[in-house]
Amino acid sequence: MTVTQLKAVPVPHSALDDIPPMVERLRATFESGKTRPLAWRREQLQGLRAYGKEQAERLAEALHADLNKPAMEAYAADIGQVSNEAKHALKNLAKWTKPERIGRMPMLGKSVLMRDPLGVVLIIAPWNYPVGLLLSPLVGAIAAGNAAVLKPSEVTAHTSAVLAETLPKYLDSDAITVVEGGVEETTTLLDQRFDHIMYTGNGQVGRIVMEKAAHTLTPVTLELGGKSPCIVDATADLETTARRIAWGKFMNAGQTCIAPDYVLVEDSVHDGLISALEKTVKQFYGNNPQETQDYARVVNQRHHGRLTKLLEGQEIAFGGKTDVDDCYIEPTVLKNVSVDSPIMKNEIFGPILPVLKIANVDEGIAFVRARDKPLALYIFSGEEDVAEKVLEETSSGGACVNGTIMHIGDARMPFGGVGESGMGAYHGRSSFETFTHRKATLRRGLRFDFKMMYPPYTKFLTNMVKKSV
Ligand code: NAD
């Protein structure tokens, strides 16, 4: 059986002239106060829950057409994350929005933190999880009481079209709108005034977004990528380690922002790990992964070309078959990789895993520290102290001990990068915080007024204040 061929479809576009008045319309809605009441926010979040349930199959079909995404990965990692986030927000909305009492300021009044919605926000999403990365941030934007413009990736055109067609049936179109398109449309959007921009994608475009946002002093959240390392020491259980690395790497054909990018393994278990990875990949995808429904494709021929070029001159431990017409690259592990080769320079973002030998964990730590701070870091070890040392001595957006990817699944934890892997964070309460302003508020009464504090200042007051310094 051959899997469905990825079909090229025309990139959907919104009319450029429609963009400025559309943003103004959303601003008018926000200014009217419509998006502030908790009832409105709940209704939209429930709309998103219903959307996930009722449109799951259509979205999964579109994801299959765009990426050959297995249904399980579509439901669990893409569509499912939106439902989970919306459920978590609905449960916690009252708690999050309640003004937070800080305490009393002696003789002055009560300090309280209020959470103001920001206004109209822009959410720009990439193609690898085109549903989840567009709508999970939206959960936070809605919970915070904002209006929002959603810009799905044009690269996954089937999914973009389904989102644009179906979302208005579930959400208030006066406040939430989808703009389809690519660079031109996103550029026109970035020329409008927003109150926050959340961008997920590569760092090059992240810089463009930040530069544009600087003109209007618009705050940005940048969810970027990078080379997320795995460090494996000699005490790690190799079978479990291989299973967890292979799962995190080859899911969505390696096109996951927190996929393990490369492995640094202690010399003594290098060969054992490679054998365990090979055995695992066979167990997951069979002898010919091109035939299974459970293995995705590279998103398009441009990325296929980029990835096959990275294979040139490399020593393939196993895998390595490619088929450009099917955008297929077999799950591939490389060994004896030079640190100076192109594959070790930029994020791979595909199903190719370089495995590099290290003498010990200290060498692994030094390797990671000498490079950009990654979005995720994975340490596999049977020794808790070793894992602790790696966590203490490295900096990364997030981390997982003896596992990959799963740290993203706890909605109570922030998800975001550091340094080159991004700025700001979201998920759960962090999304709500990202899309609100924390207004420091002092609440005073009018009955008591300490008149001595006003000019003309007495010598007594000046001395008293001086003593307190
Ligand atoms: P992409 O090509 O879909 O681009 C992302 C968005 O930017 C799209 O909506 C696109 O229309 C817009 N865009 C592209 N070029 C632009 C330009 N010149 N000006 C304005 N807008 C422009 O996706 P991508 O960047 O290829 O995504 C892959 C990258 O995203 C990887 O580096 C990956 O690690 C990263 N990523 C990060 C996260 C995270 O949560 N941190 C999640 C997923 C992907």
Image (tube, rainbow, N blue to C red):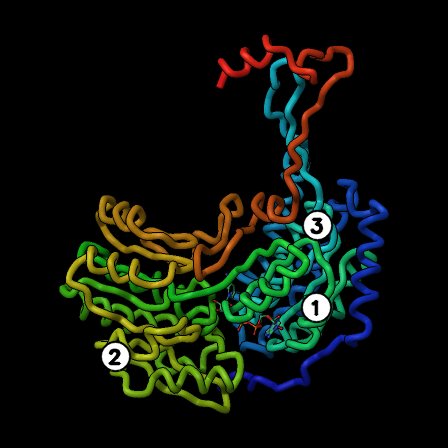
Q: Which residue is mark 2?
A: 317
Q: Is residue 102 above or below residue 255?
A: above
Name the residue type under label 3.
Ile
Residue identifier under label 1: 163
* Residue at the (34%, 79%) spot, across then down: 342
Q: Nearer the viewer, residue 107 or 424?
A: 107
Per the model, the C-alpha gap separating discs 2 and 3 is 48 Å
Label count reads 3
Q: Quadrant of residue 376?
A: bottom left
| Label whose residue precedes the other's in the sequence (3 or 1) | 3
Picture quadrant of residue 18: bottom right
- Seen from the viewer's position, the closer of residues 308 and 16 is 16
Badge 2 vs badge 3, beta-carbon distance below 8 Å? no
Q: Label 2 is placed on what type of residue?
A: Ala
Q: On screen, 420 above or below 321?
A: above
Q: Tag 1 or tag 2, which sits nearer the N-term? A: 1
Q: CA distance from mark 2 to mark 1?
A: 40 Å
Q: Is residue 239 left or right of residue 433?
A: left
Q: Residues within 10 Å of mark 1 (few under 14, many from 20)?
A: many
Q: Residue at x 84, y 59 (%)?
A: 25
* Residue type pointed to by label 1: Leu
